[in-house]
Image (cartoon, helix red, strand yellow):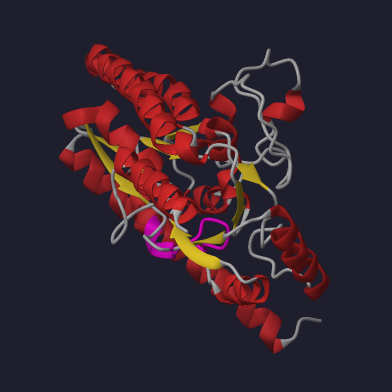
Amino acid sequence: MRTDSQNEARATKRILAVLVALVVGLAGSAGAQAGRQPLDVVVTLQPWASLTSVIGGEHATVTTLLPAGASPHAFDPLPSQAVALARADLVLMNGGLDDWLVRLLEATATSARHLTLLTAIEFTGIEGAHDHGHDGDDHHSGDDEDEHDGEALNPHVWLDPVLAAEAVGPIADALAEIDPEHAEEFRSNAAGLHSDLLRLDEELRSTLQPVAGAPIVPFHDAWVYFARRYDLDIVATLEPFPGREPSAAYLAATVAQIRSSGVRVIFTERQLNDRTAEVVAESAGVELAVLDPIGGVPGPNDYFDLLRWNATIIVEALGSE
């Protein structure tokens, strides 16, 4: 026999389902009346949205789901965001850290094309927060399915501009499939962006060369691909599992590791609470600096500005006496 609370919960779910269906229907009608140009593209993270806007040009309107200052690891999407998904022609997600989008997609039942970038590019993945090898091979044969499992790999690939460059082709192909009339323009924009990203890599390598090999401690494992690309040594992370507060024993071991490795700065992140970092920094006798792996107002909106901003913060922090 169901209790009153169970009946109320079931009723609430039915009401929410009806509301979502109404939102989807209204959005679909509006979209049909307005036509399909420019394409509506919904992207989970601002860095990918920035690059997608360049590829789509005037033929795509790009909407970012993750609000500025929010962490994708702990984000809970709003029912109102069903409107954007219902109107979308293309839904683009990173994979691994934005799986919350899957639940929202199921709720809206959108027919939009989906693209998950973590499975669309070929690269040597890093499994786990503390595996930060410095091999320079960014490609694999594709035979190992585990390396393309979005849940097994560290998902923060956009912070390596060379890996981001690998993603622009699949994005252009997805847009071209939906809008063949402008396929040549999408692919031309992607080719130019690919070249620009490789030039950005050279620029960042030059910027970060003075601190190459330096030990660093980021708040969590967002920076492993960036560190591998630019020869930074991640000796510890303060939050080994995103969204889960570390134990006292783990923090004590981290403080000891910081002292023994010569780390001078702990890097927090704009999207995360820095209380733990403040405690560890005080215990270890080191400074704090703030990085931003995602961007968005009031941080950098543009992908190129975002990576340059972070590189500058790292050099200034590690180069200070």
Q: Can you say whether 187 is above or below 85 in the image?
A: above
In the rendered image, is residue 235 in sight? yes
Q: Can you say whether 135 is above or below 153 in the image?
A: above
Quadrant, the N terminus: bottom right
Q: Is residue 200 left or right of residue 205?
A: left
Magenta-colored stretch includes residue 79: yes
The structure residue drawn at horizontal position 55% and vertical position 42%, both measured from the top left corner, is 156
The structure residue drawn at horizontal position 55% and vertical position 60%, both measured from the top left corner, is 265
Residue 283: quarter of image: bottom right
Question: 189 and 276: which one is in front?
Answer: 276
- Residue 275 lies, in percent from the top left, at 57, 76
Question: 84 and 268: which one is in front?
Answer: 268
Q: Can you say whether 187 is above or below 112 in the image?
A: above
Magenta-colored stretch includes residue 310: no
**Magenta segment:** 70-81
In the rendered image, is residue 43 in sight? no
- Residue 231 lies, in percent from the top left, at 58, 34
Q: Can you say whether 223 is above or below 283 in the image?
A: above
- Residue 180 lies, in percent from the top left, at 28, 15
Question: 263 and 127: which one is in front?
Answer: 263
Label total for image: 0
